[in-house]
Image (spheres, helix red, strand yellow):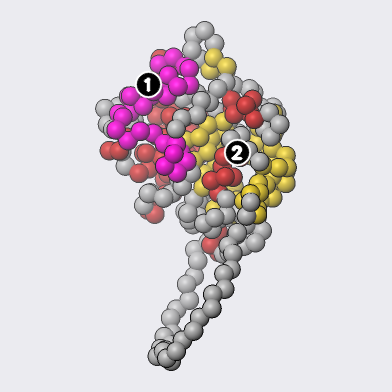
Amino acid sequence: MRWHLGGSVDNSGKVRVPAIPDGEPVLSARSLMASGPEGTVFGPVDLDLYPGELCIVTGDEGSGKSAFLLTLSGRFRGATGDLTICGIDALARPYEAIQNTAVARLGNYVLPEDRLTVTESISERAYLDGISLAEAERRAAQMEEILGFRIERGAEIEQLDPVTRIVGATALVALRPARVIVVDDVDAAVPHADQVAMYQYLIKLAQFNGAAIVCTAINGDTVPKGVLRVRLASRRRSYVHAYTDHEPAEMTVVDTDPVISADPLLDTDTGTVIVTRTGEN
């Protein structure tokens, strides 16, 4: 599945994106939430994202992380509250809003094709987003310079290391500048020791493009200081089952050390949305 980013393209194939006034957020949400037949999917959330900012979203399984990402990119119907992207009411005018957003990865549905080379992926992205190949190559080279490394053009996507795959997927959708870029399961395949570097690269991409990059993550203990974090409320349901034990079972009590979380805020079950920055209480 591919989503067209949109935006305006001049005759040279270069992209023009709306300017954001100094000090103004690129995305603003108030009481943003979504509901389904079984109740609340996520929210309510109040959030402001600024150009060059990285935001990490965590939460229990079923807390609505993927739906939240789609909503922030203007691609989830049924959300309520207020959501403004680049000054556009994204809930009332979603097709205008998505011209300024991009989805780099969403589960197994949206992601670069494994068997394509980096060169082929850049060409495909340029074609899908309606920009010239020369412009796409120019922006790819600029991003590589900012990141400090070059991705081998002849390598297939599946041959890249986990960090390069995530950073590369984000860079591909940024070939056509977007003000909001979303990335699902950013740390799912990345070794714990490499996650700090991955986040630093994503921050560089956000600052280069003047975009807000929003990622869902499994863990939060490697998020760099100062990064905005959103902990979605738990939607776990309790189920009660009848249990009959006809024969007494042997029980052994073993003393174990308590599990101490590296990041209690991100790991503790919560019934409310928490928005904070790494390093804050």
On screen, residue 167 versus residue 59, left or right, reads: left
Question: In the image, is residue 94 above or below residue 123?
Answer: below
Tell me where the magenta segment starts and ends, as one range: 105-133
Task: Please report the residue visible at 51 percent of the width from the left and 25 percent of the height from the top.
Answer: 4
Task: Please report the residue visible at 64 percent of the width from the left and 25 percent of the height from the top.
Answer: 96
Sequence order check, earlier mark of 1 and 2: 2
Q: Secondary structure at mark 1?
A: helix
Task: Please report the residue visible at 66 percent of the width from the left and 49 percent of the height from the top.
Answer: 35
**What's the distance in space between the residues labelled 1 and 2, CA to CA?**
28 Å
Q: Mark on residue 76? A: 2
Q: Compare residues 48 and 104 and report the one nearer the observer.
A: 104
Residue 154 location in percent, x, y? 26, 27
Residue 145 location in percent, x, y? 40, 28
Point out the frontmost of discs 1 and 2: 2
Q: Compare residues 42 and 263 and report the one nearer the observer.
A: 42
Q: Compare residues 270 and 138 and report the one nearer the observer.
A: 270
Q: Amino acid at mark 1?
A: Ser
Q: Classify residue 71 by image quadrant.
A: top right
Q: Classify residue 231 by image quadrant.
A: bottom right
Q: Is residue 107 magenta?
A: yes
Task: Please report the residue visible at 42 percent of the width from the left and 42 percent of the height from the top.
Answer: 108
Q: Mark on residue 123? A: 1
Q: Mark on residue 280? A: none
Query: Can residue 37 be seen?
Result: yes
Query: Can residue 226 be seen?
Result: no
Residue 278 location in percent, x, y? 57, 53
